[in-house]
Image: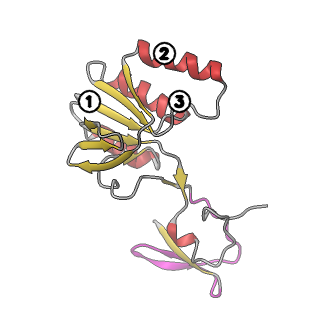
Amino acid sequence: AKAVGIDLASKTLLFEGRPPLSWDVLSLNLGSRPKIPAGLQDVGVGVKPIEGYLAALEAVDQCHHAVVVGAGAGGVEIALALRARWPKARVSLIHGGTTILPGHPAMARARMARILEAHGVELHLGSKVVAAKGRELELENGTRVASDFVTYTTGACPHSWLRDSGLAVDAQGFVSVD
């Protein structure tokens, strides 16, 4: 069941569509949610949680153009995996930053750029996705990219209910740990 809240005073965990669960000692293993830009949640699917992503992937019979938003390690891996899954489809990798694999050594970024190019993955760097209409994404530079399948690998954000839970959270809203 999906956890939706916590009541620290009564030591109960709240669930969607299920009665609360009392606890003496609680260990949270919530994972995270994909950081999908506002207004784009209905277009595409985040790679996390993996079960939802795999279900969305299996639901696509034929793909002509797959788009991956986010060019960190997860994004380049997913772009290459989609290329392998749909060898005749166009695969595009969109990233707001000016380089793939931000934070990685320059040599690793250059090598991965060559690998992506060799596999025909199109790079759209330096322009974030700002809007979507149907299956078309609009980038902040005005480029429009139509797609049959959109994947977000744009990082993680915490579950929204954690901020109001009474648990100690960091500036981003993730539960603070020792």
Mark 2 = which residue?
115
Query: In this picture, is 25 found above or below 141?
Result: below
Task: Give the left or right position of residue 178, taking residue 89 as reference.
Answer: right
Secondary structure at numbered mark 3: loop
Nearer-N-terminus badge (2/3)? 3
| x and y, in percent, of residue 53 in the image | 39, 44
Q: CA distance from mark 2 to mark 3?
A: 14 Å
| Kind of residue at disc 3 | Thr
Residue at the (57%, 60%) spot, across then down: 30
Furthest residue in direction front, as rendered: 141
Frontmost residue, 15 versus 122: 122
Mark 1, other Cα within 10 Å: few <14 / some 14–19 / many ≥20: some
Residue tagged 1: 65
Across and down, in percent, residue 86 comes to 30, 24
What residue is shown at x 22% (from left), y 49% (from top)?
Answer: 133
Indicate which disc, 1 or 2, sits on the residue closer to the N terminus: 1
Highlighted magenta segment, given as a residue range: 9-30
Amino acid found under the numbered disc labelled 1: His
Image vertical order of residue 29 relative to residue 161, above or below:
above
Q: Is residue 55 left or right of residue 110?
A: left
Name the residue at the right extreme: 178
